[in-house]
Every structure is written in structure tokens, then in C-alpha cells.
Amino acid sequence: MKKILFIAYGGGHINIIDLIAQQLLKEKDIEFKILALTTAYNKVVDKYPQGIVKKISDYINIFQDNIKKIQKYGLELLEENYNVNSGISKDDTIMYLGCSMNDLVNQYGQKEAGKLYISKKRQAFLPVETMKKILEYENIDIVISTTSPRFEQASFIAGNELGIQTLEILDLFGELYPLPEAKHIICMNDNIENSLKEEGLKDRKFYYLGQPAIEKTVNNILNLDSSKIKQQLNLQKDITILYATQQPNIYNEDFSYHSFAGYDVINNNIFNIFDTLNDKFSINILLRIHPNEDINNYKEWLDKYPFVKYINDNLNIEESISVCDVLLNQASTVSLEAIASNKKVFTFKYYLDKAFPLPAVMKKPFIFSDGFKKLEENLCKYLNNPVEKSEIENFLPKNSVKNIIKLIKEL
């Protein structure tokens, strides 16, 4: 019987893996385990028969030769990395950090590893040797994961070095940090393949099969009754704009994190645009902040511009997209979900950027603005002559889970 190891962190990563693994439970000739990292474990452990979902500390027995060093490193890094409200156990955090630091020390030596950790923190981790031991212990035939640094990236490198099949499911587009390591890559269209080939990935096999979590979200959005949601929020004006925020970060040319831009300059510009639009047009303006953000970072502007309605407490993300006609978003998954749900999507770059984090949304059918002045012009132009719907490219192939499972069997 062939055996798969899925690896995933929390958030959108485990959601993708969970949709595929749930269907694989019905397959009699395939066995699988899920290494659920950080917050992913509690999200899925109760969905599967006992023993399928594992956390890193479940493998403590295969690291007995180095367990004292691993636990020492883990305890040293625990205080600055442990969040008591995360739902992750201290034992698992110690094992996660300890294995990662142990691999870093083995690769670079104690002194250099310490410098790397000080400068990069957890981004310095790439526990390839740890993942090799787990893959060999589980006797794995194929490694499947998503796009993320540290353990997910390390799992592909380890699998490639061991001669195991590696399959990576991209969560978004081809402008990624880190670049995919797997030999087989699932993406949404040929534009993504071409982008990755331009970045040097010419020896991989690409498959246009969609993205399960986004496809599920889009299907949910399209099945909602938006008119009822509008009534619930008392939205009486002609057009509804949804501003879906994200932390105002600045990125390096390789799309890695550079620095924090701060809220003042971003919010001053965006809310000034909203003030102009509110004076000129019959529109509703909604604000939905990213789950990792704090509403207090927006309170000053919400108090100043009371016509902007904060909706996180009233609607989930699917309801929020369903009720809008226009989405405003810098560059995130929400842009893709909205464009696939036939919404007008305006993306923008602020002048502080070193590199735009998602170049794919700078092209049609997204309406991209380089700076706040251009954003205001583009929004006014559209609102002066709004179009109900427009034909979009096939960004999101359908039946992604079914087709991914078919590929897994072939591999």
C-alpha cells in the first residue's frame, strides 16, 4: 500500500490539505498521515481516525540520540516564541523549535547559527534533516504540502534528496518566497507556470488543477443570497465597496518581508479617497480587516469617517465578498476569491513599496493602481460608468480536489 505524508501549517495551508485528505479517506489503496504544524493540529485532529494527524512532538522517539540538545534549544527559544493563547502545547513548541535550531546548528555551527537566528528569527529555520528522519520512519512514497517556509519547504528538499515523489500545491500565484522545491507543482494557469519558469524553475512538471480552499470559498460565495445580507446591514445605496485590508508591510525584491510601513500613511490616504467617493457617488463603503490585525489600528479613521462601516463582527469573509460590487485590496487571497466570484477588483501599490508582493494582480482582469492618486482616479472612472459584470480569465479550474486526487494516484 502506498503512503502519503501531508505537511501543513495552520491558516489556509491546512484548509487546502484537509479538503484533499477528507476525500482520500474513501480510498482503500492509499494510506496517509498529516503532520499538522503549530495551530493546524487542533483544527483537524478530531476530523480523522486516531493516528492519522500527528504533531512534531509525536516523533520524539526517533530523535532520542539528540533529544537533550533538541530540548535545550527548544527551552532557550521558548519564551520569545510561545503564545499561551495559541492552543499549542509547550511540549510541541519546544520540539518544533528545538528540532529546527538543532538542524541549523548542525549545518552552520553554533556561532553562525546563533547569528542567523538573531537576524532572521524563525525564518532562519529549514529543518531538512529532521524531515528526512520523519519521512524514513513513516516509509513515505509521496510528500504533499503547500507553499510555506520552514517545515513545508524542508519536507520537499528532504523528499527530493531521498528520491521520494514531491507534490506542491500553490496557494496563490507564482511570485513566491520561498520558491517551490517540489518536482511536481499544482497551480491555477499557464501564467503561473511561465512566471515560475522565468524565475528558474524549468525542470518541474506543472499541472493546472486549481486551488481547493479558494474553490470552496468561491462556491460558497456564489450560493449566498446577497440581497438578504444587504438588508441585514441596511445597505440602501447603489454600489457597495468592500475594503479588505492587510498589514501594511514592505517587501524585498524576492518577496521576502522587509519592514513595517505603519498605519498612518496608508490609512490617511485610503480614507481620504473614501471621503471623496462618498461625496461624489451613491455608495456603501465597508471595511473588513485581516484576521491578524487589530481594529484599534483603524479606530481613529472609523471615528473620523462614520460612513465607513466595519463588518468583521457582522459578516464572515464569504458574506463580505458576496455583498460587495467592488473589492479594494492591496494583494491577497481575497482578491482572487472576489475576481472568481465576478466582482470588480481594484488592487493598489503604495509609494513606500520596494517590491509589489503579488505581481499577478497588477494585470487584467484586476484593475491595478500604482499609488493612491491613480487609485482614486480608477475608482472614480469606474463609479462614473459602472459595469455589472465582465468576462474574466479562467483563474480557477473547477473540481480541483477530484483532479488532484487523480494526479496523486498517477504519481
Image: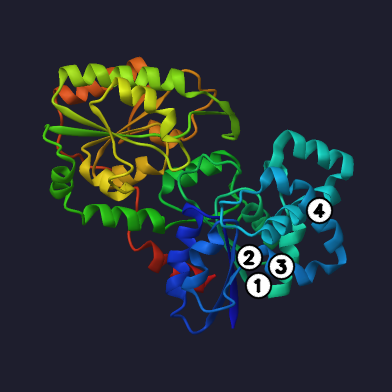
* Residue mark closest to the camera, 1 vs 2: 2
Residue drawn at 82 percent across, 42 percent down:
113
The kind of residue on which mark 3 rests is Ile
Q: For the residue labelled by badge 2, is the local secondary structure a helix, a strand or a loop?
A: loop
Q: Which residue is mark 1?
A: 140
The kind of residue on which mark 1 rests is Ile
Q: How far separated are the C-alphas under marks 3 and 2?
A: 11 Å
Q: Which residue is mark 2?
A: 55
Residue 134: mark in rendering: 3
- Tally of numbered discs: 4
Q: Which residue is mark 4?
A: 102
The kind of residue on which mark 4 rests is Asn
Asked which quadrant contains residue 354, the reply is top right
Pointer 3 or 4: first along the chain: 4
Coloring applied to the structure = rainbow
Q: How far separated are the C-alphas under marks 3 and 4?
A: 15 Å
* Foreground pick, 77 / 118: 77
Quick one: label 3, few (<14), some, or many (20+) residues within 10 Å?
Answer: some
Pointer 4 or 1: first along the chain: 4
Residue 50 vertical placement versus 338 (above, below): below
* Residue mark closest to the camera, 4 vs 1: 4
Residue drawn at 65 percent across, 57 percent down:
156
* Residue mark closest to the camera, 3 vs 2: 2
Q: How far separated are the C-alphas under marks 4 and 2?
A: 18 Å
